[in-house]
Image: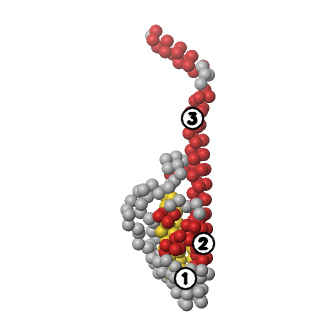
Amino acid sequence: MKFTRKSINLLKRFARDEEASATIEFVILVPVVMWVVFSVIESGWLATEQTMLNRGLNLAVRDLRLGRRNNPTPAQIKQDICDYAGILRNCMSYLTLELVKLGNPIGGNAAVCVDRSTTVNPVVTFNPGSHAEQDIMIARVCYLVDPLIPGAGFGAALPKDPTGAYHMVAFSAFVNEPGN
């Protein structure tokens, strides 16, 4: 009984003690605040990259539509997209481009992305269409993005491929103008 009374008195004294109460609040709140901070940074950076990917694709497609590229190759168009986008890291290595005439299948439902676990590039359709027929063309790109903070905040919750990359996809359509 003496041990129990001593234990109860010790617990009462511990409950009344207010030292280190700020530490407990700190320990509880800091992980939540850090998760929010990391999520804001990650989502802001992903939104910036998506915007720049869309911008790069739209400006490269504009060059195609206006006939600034005669008989373009996939590498030239990818380079144009990367140059216009500006901030995309390893853009030429992590970007795939599909260009098909409307009415042709565009590779199923999912965009074809680079597989970093192999050295073989994925096979995609590249058909620049005909200017004489005014073909309606669809361009689709997939760019691999590595999260800035992979294990924290929003970056931890993103759907990723086996190499840890998030797939960012952009589309654009245009009509081949005659006489170009």
Q: Residues within 10 Å of mark 3 (few under 14, many from 20)?
A: few
What residue sits right under mark 2 in the picture? 58
Measured Cα–Cα span from mark 3 to mark 1: 62 Å
Foreground disc of the pair 1, 2: 1
Residue 129 x %, y %: 51, 84
Q: How many marks?
A: 3
Q: Closer to the camera, 52 or 71?
A: 71
Viewport quadrant of the N terminus: top left
Answer whether residue 167 is visible to the viewer in this image.
Answer: no
The amino acid type of the residue labelled 2 equals: Asn
Q: In the structure shown, which secondary structural element does the residue marked by tag 2 occupy?
A: helix
The amino acid type of the residue labelled 1 equals: Asn
Q: Is residue 177 left or right of residue 116?
A: right
Residue 37 x %, y %: 60, 46
Viewport quadrant of the C terminus: bottom right
Residue 178 x %, y %: 59, 89
Measured Cα–Cα span from mark 1 to mark 2: 18 Å
Return the mark for residue 70: 1
Q: Residues within 10 Å of mark 2 (few under 14, many from 20)?
A: many
Residue occupying image coordinates x 60% and y 41%: 33
What residue sits right under mark 3 in the picture? 28
Residue 112 picture quarter: bottom left
